[in-house]
Image (tube, rainbow, N blue to C red):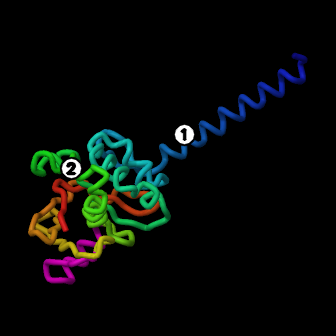
């Protein structure tokens, strides 16, 4: 390799490191929230972030089984109420295994879309809606039924159509296509 080629290769390597350094710096400048031991980046979409949370393996598997990955990678915006693996573990034994079977895809899709609101609603907006509603705010899900948000002390809760309550344990996990609020109970339509 002649001297000119070596200089060109060296220059390309320096530029490569500079650009990858800038990308890494950009990622670290973002205001991230830790969920399941992983940083959630606002520049990534819901799926790109969720797959990194060790607390949401069941949810990610269910989203894949329901064929909703592409939808949740879309433009949105979406507000996702994301049950943890512990929340799924509260369901009767065998429920998750049964729901992810291909023949139960419609029911799984119904349950998962019941955890999604069309639009981006941060905790402050939901609190304001609860206050304006004299302690409760009903919001329609992508599935079609409504959820009821309410507060107790400094905590935000959501009630499903069966009367089950889920506590928002981590709010405002911003995504490029919406926001995630981590919840401690699976909601049922």
Q: Position of residue 158 (x, y in %)?
A: 18, 67
Circle 1 — which element?
helix
Residue at 16% x, 68% y is 160
Side (left or right) of 12 relative to 88: right
Q: Does 134 appear in magenta?
A: yes
Callout 1 crowding tier (Cα within 10 Å): few <14, some 14–19, many ≥20: few
Callout 2 crowding tier (Cα within 10 Å): few <14, some 14–19, many ≥20: few
Q: Does 29 appear in magenta?
A: no
In magenta, the rendered stretch is: 123-140
Closer to us: 17 or 99: 99
Q: CA distance from mark 1 to mark 2?
A: 41 Å
The label shown at residue 95 is none
Side (left or right) of 134 relative to 26: left
**Vertical comparison of 77 with 46: above or below:** below
Q: Quadrant of the C terminus?
A: bottom left
Residue at 21% x, 49% y is 98
Residue at 41% x, 48% y is 49
**Vertical comparison of 110 with 66: above or below:** below
Instruction: Assess whether mark 2 and mark 1 are in contact (beta carbons under 8 angstroms).
Output: no
Circle 2 — which element?
helix
Q: Position of residue 178 (x, y in %)?
A: 41, 63
Closer to us: 180 or 140: 140
Closer to us: 39 or 109: 109
The label shown at residue 24 is 1
Closer to us: 178 or 155: 178
Side (left or right) of 11 relative to 155: right
**Vertical comparison of 45 with 12: above or below:** below
Q: Position of residue 173 (x, y in %)?
A: 35, 56
Residue at 12% x, 63% y is 165
Mark 1 vs mark 2, foreground winner is 2
Side (left or right) of 105 relative to 156: right
The label shown at residue 98 is 2
């Amino acid at each position: 390799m002649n001297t000119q080629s070596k200089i060109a290769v060296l220059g390309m390597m320096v530029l490569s490191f500079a650009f990858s350094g800038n990308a890494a710096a950009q990622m670290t400048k973002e205001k991230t929230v830790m969920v399941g031991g992983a940083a959630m980046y606002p520049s990534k979409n819901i799926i790109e972030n969720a797959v990194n949370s060790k607390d949401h393996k069941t949810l990610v598997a269910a989203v894949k089984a329901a064929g909703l990955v592409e939808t949740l990678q879309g433009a949105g915006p979406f507000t996702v109420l994301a049950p943890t693996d512990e929340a799924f573990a509260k369901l009767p034994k065998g429920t998750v295994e049964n729901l992810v079977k291909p023949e139960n895809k419609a029911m799984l899709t119904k349950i998962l879309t019941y955890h999604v609101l069309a639009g981006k609603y941060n905790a402050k907006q939901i609190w304001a809606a609860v206050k304006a509603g004299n302690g409760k705010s009903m919001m329609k899900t992508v599935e079609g039924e409504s959820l009821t948000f309410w507060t107790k002390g400094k905590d935000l809760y959501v009630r499903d159509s069966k009367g089950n309550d889920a506590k928002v344990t981590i709010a405002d996990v911003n995504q490029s296509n919406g926001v995630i609020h981590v919840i401690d109970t699976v909601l049922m339509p």
